[in-house]
Image: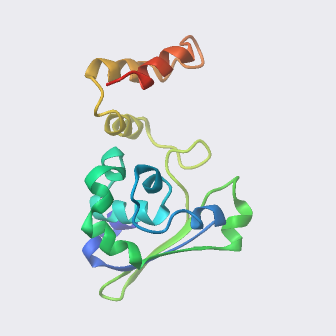
Amino acid sequence: QLRLAHGFDASDIARIEIETFDAAAALYPDMPDTTSMAQYSLPFAVAMMAVRGQVGPDEVQGAALSDPDVAALLPRIAVTATDRHTARFPDVRTADVAVVLTDGSRRAVTDVQPRGGPQEVPMPPEEVQEKFGIMTATLAPGRRATLWAMRGRMDADAPFSGLADLVTAPS
């Protein structure tokens, strides 16, 4: 959000300061060795977003887990828990984020909420479809289309077993 609004990139960042709720601050703080560690690391996700502009399947596995630009930014990200954010969790998941640039300027936002969650900032349908495309890029086109078509029918007429079969079947 800050990067897009202010037009800086990862090389312009001196440090990132995040104040959030205790459970988020307790997530894995270092360069992850595995996909599981990467998925549960707020600093890694923030560094990856700053460096690559997105966090999708390609950013939490393989070569991404040893990306030197992400590794260089990670030690400059500080995550701390605050009483204000912790008191609202789990009903609200928020953070205050400040990016200090190499020129000394500071860009900040308060009470940032994750995008796309049911309680948080909903994503417009076109962004949901774009994210779906990123997350399912390795699936065959027909399987992707069937999964996408099922999304609106889950409560109405599609049995969950059909969705589970599509998701868990080999690619």
For the N terminus, give its image quadrant. Answer: bottom left
Q: Is residue 11 left or right of residue 165?
A: left
User: How far across and down, in percent of the image, does residue 135 sit?
Assistant: 36, 38
The residue located at (33%, 49%) in the rendering is 61
Which color scheme is applied? rainbow
Asked if one can make out residue 1 in the rendered structure from this viewpoint, the answer is: no
Is 31 in front, or is 16? 31
Residue 146 picture quarter: top left
Is 165 in front, or is 104? 165
Above or below residue 71? Residue 14 is below
User: How far across and down, in percent of the image, does residue 65 sit?
Assistant: 33, 58
Q: Residue furthest top?
A: 157
Q: Residue furthest right?
A: 87
Is 94 in front, or is 60? 60
Q: Residue furthest front?
A: 33
For the C terminus, give its image quadrant. Answer: top left
User: How far across and down, in percent of the image, does residue 152 sit?
Assistant: 50, 21
The residue located at (39%, 66%) in the rendering is 31
Is 143 in front, or is 3? 143
Residue 125 picture quarter: top left
Above or below residue 23? Residue 36 is above
The residue located at (30%, 85%) in the rendering is 102
